[in-house]
Structure formats: structure tokens, C-alpha cells
Image: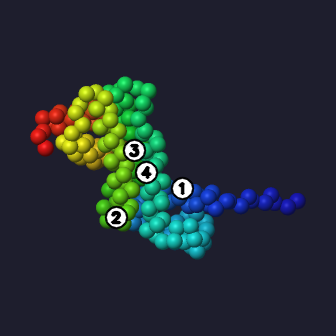
Amino acid sequence: MSAPRRNRLTPEERRMQLLATGVNFLADHTLDGLTMDELARRAGVSRALAFHYFESTQGMHRAVVTMARDAMVSATAPDHDLPPRERIDDTLLRFAGFVREHRGTFSSLVRGIASGDPTVRAVVDESRELNAAHLRDAFGELGVPVTRALTISLRAWVAFAEEVLVTTATDDRADDSAIVELLSRTLDGAVEAARDSTL
């Protein structure tokens, strides 16, 4: 009796397999360590096939980071069925949970991008801008004037929140609710400072 034939992956399925392999690599390594040879080895394909899908290491890095970012954005998207304040706290709690579950990947993204391709950095910056925009919308619904100072403060606070989340994700003693309380209080402080600013 012959062995069952393995189904061939479609080009899109193969590309998604390679991207998933790249994202999994980030769980324990920095992006700079993800070479085309390493991706091909881990995915069990030829180096030529990996290049066929991504053309260059930089292109592969951009695609991998985009996939990781999109997973984070999807998992932490605001629940618009909630009132604005509850929506913010709910998003922060889910963000903390996501980072704890994917701590290596998140850390690699926010800390390992500095030395990478400017286009790769731009992909990560897009998520920061999106998170700041979600906050700006929620506070706008709460009657906070949407000013230049608020926009700058929220963008800076997102970077601060990322550092808090990366640091506490490796500490099993840190409770997600305590992390959210800290983030929520510092967020309110940033918003109040923006209210009083003439910037």
C-alpha cells in the first residue's frame, strides 16, 4: 500500500508558512538574526524558494514584521461596544495579555528594530500611530480637546507603555491588572498635562 500523497501548498499558503516561521523566530531571537538561510532551514525549503517569495532579506524582514504587527493590532483592537473609558482599560488589559503571551516577539519588535531597515521601523511606527489614534478618539469622545499637545503626548505615552509592557512581561510576579492600573494612571497624567499645555 502506497503512502498517502502530501498536498502541495498553494503559493499563498507557502508564503504564509514562511511568514509564520519568521514570526515564530522572533519569539527567541532578534530580527537581525533572521537571515534567508535561517528562514529556509526552519521552514524546510530551499534558499532559492525563500528568495522567490521575498526577493531580499530586507523584503522578508518587512513582511515578517508586518505580519507580527497585524496580529498584535488585531488582538488589541478597541471594542467599540464599550463606553470610551471602559474601552481604554479593556484595550490595555488585552494588550498586557498579548505581550505576556508573545513576549519574545513583542520585545524583538519594539527593541530590536532600532538598528534595522527604515522601512521596517516604519511598519512598527504605524502601529504606534494607530494605537495613539485609538486613544485620541476615545478621549475625544470623553470631551478632551484634540490638540497638538494631546497628539504628541499620546504618541509619547504609547512608547512609554511599550517599555513598561516589555519590562513587566518577563516578570512573572507582575499582575496584568496592576500593570493596567499603572498604565491607566500615567495615561491620565499625560492627558491632563496636554490639557494644560499651550504647545
**Residue in front for this viewpoint, 167 or 14:** 14
- The correct choice, above or below, for 84 with respect to 167 in the image is above
Q: Position of residue 176 (x, y in %)?
A: 35, 34
Residue type at numbered disc 4: Arg
Q: Quadrant of residue 123?
A: bottom left
Q: In terms of sequence position, does the residue under pointer 1 or pointer 3 come before the other?
A: 1
- Does dot 1 land on a helix, a strand or a loop? helix
* Residue 118: numbered disc: 2
**Residue in front for this viewpoint, 134 or 190:** 134
**Location of the N terminus (image quadrant):** bottom right
Give the CA separation, mark 2 to mark 1: 22 Å
Q: Position of residue 199 (x, y in %)?
A: 13, 44
Residue type at numbered disc 2: Pro
- Does dot 3 land on a helix, a strand or a loop? helix
Q: In terms of sequence position, does the residue under pointer 1 or pointer 4 come before the other?
A: 1
Q: Is residue 9 left or right of residue 21?
A: right
Residue type at numbered disc 3: Val
The outermost residue toward the top is 83
Q: Say if residue 42 shows up in the picture.
A: yes
Residue type at numbered disc 1: Ala
Question: Looking at the image, which residue is at 25% across and 28% down?
Answer: 143
Q: Which residue is mark 4?
A: 69
Q: Which residue is mark 3?
A: 99
- Does dot 2 land on a helix, a strand or a loop? helix
Q: Say if residue 107 shows up in the picture.
A: no
* Residue 20: numbered disc: 1
